[in-house]
Image (tube, helix red, strand yellow):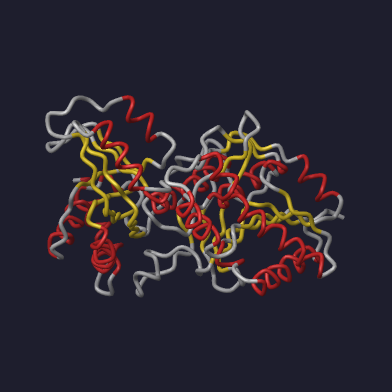
Amino acid sequence: MTRPGIVVQKYGGTSVETPEDLRRIARRVAAIHGRGHPVVVVVSAMGDATDRLMEKVRQVAKDPSRRELDLLLATGELASAALLAMALEALGVAAVALSGPQCGIFTNSVHGNARILAVRPQRIQAELNAGRVVVVAGFQGESPDGELTTLGRGGSDTTAVALAAALGIEICEINTDVDGVFTADPRWVAEARPLEEIDPREMQALAWNGARVLKAEAVEFARENGVGLEVRRSDGGGRGTRVRSFPQGMENAWIPRRSAISGVAGRKDLVRLEGRAGAPALPAELIREVAPYDLVFGRSSSLHSPWALYLNIEEIPHLDTFTADLEGRFGSCLEITAGLGAVSLVGFGIGSRPRALWDALRVMEDAALVTLDSWTGQESLTFVVTEADVSLGIEKLHDAFFGEETSPVESSEVEEAVLGS
């Protein structure tokens, strides 16, 4: 008799927020295990545990060591893993909680935003062979010099995908507090539509541009390793969304499109580091200073400045201290602007569609939204606005491209006919 396949699941912080949540997930995992499936469960920190730990950091240190931050923040996921393993044991299910390093997850040496380099899952395989459910603390790994590292916000997604790839699993389940992937964040846009399926390139663009349902690096890892993703509500309800995987060598296959646009995303977490007019080229020393943080976008020149970098402020423990230090060292050539955000229109190949850019710019102008900067990617059009204008920008773009009177299929066909003529 063939042994049922391994199931790899990830549960986000809101899914493990309370003891009752943990007991509910334990019952669900126990049922899957009871059907003969070996199960690997990756968990995030409970609720806002990471935010509460960061608040404690701000109370004791102005410029904390990123190494010590990793040691502290990893405790949130460790607590979730240990508690879920205990809840499973209470149901009579053999379980073991493991840290990232114990699972054989190896990363580079960048504290706070490390990338996974390799996974050696021998310990996990041994525990599964012994009949135990393996509960993994997400978001963490071990650097080449034996240090504990963390993978940045949403890093538990990457942990789950990396383990699925290492174990040879074709599908990784991402369980969250929403029904799947939508055309916009349903907490911001009530009319957002659920997507049954989405191309991984578009999903990666949505995630990179602020859609929090998945971490962009996790989608990238899934694409590179042929792992499909199923995103659904943690209670098992709803239809969920399938992020398709492609066999090796087929990653760039052309997929028939029903619509040129897949969604709208936004973020309220940007700070701009910009070269003053007449300033020299981007200083290499500045690049070294910002290298540990999440670089959202960088450009070498424009009509307004010789260069600009956009950073995600969530990765910076003390923004005031960080910016004051940079101003003290690079103030003569550097201008810093905080309180920024961005709205993005996402679709396959949208970056080469002039009509989409023209329509999006018209929507922004009609809504009197001032665009402070913009850039085009293969799958996205992004407009920098003030943080206060992000919600309105998302709402207006979504209404224009997904409203009841909008027909994305018709507009796509017209656009293709115009561009192809």
Who is closer to the viewer here, 165 or 49? Answer: 49
What residue is rendered at 30% in x and 67% in y?
Answer: 402
| On screen, residue 252 above or below 230 | above
What residue is rendered at 56% in x and 47% in y?
Answer: 158
The x and y percentages for residue 413 are: 26, 57
Residue 187 falls left or right of residue 5: left
Residue 140 falls left or right of residue 385: right
Who is closer to the viewer here, 319 or 399? Answer: 319
The x and y percentages for residue 52 are: 51, 60
Residue 289 falls left or right of residue 242: left
- Give the image quarter of residue 225: top right
What residue is rendered at 81% in x and 61% in y?
Answer: 36
Residue at the farthest front position: 60
The image quadrant where one finds the N terminus is bottom right
The x and y percentages for residue 143 are: 61, 33
Q: Is residue 74 visible?
A: yes
- Give the image quarter of residue 120: top right
The x and y percentages for residue 90 are: 81, 69
Who is closer to the viewer here, 240 or 212? Answer: 212
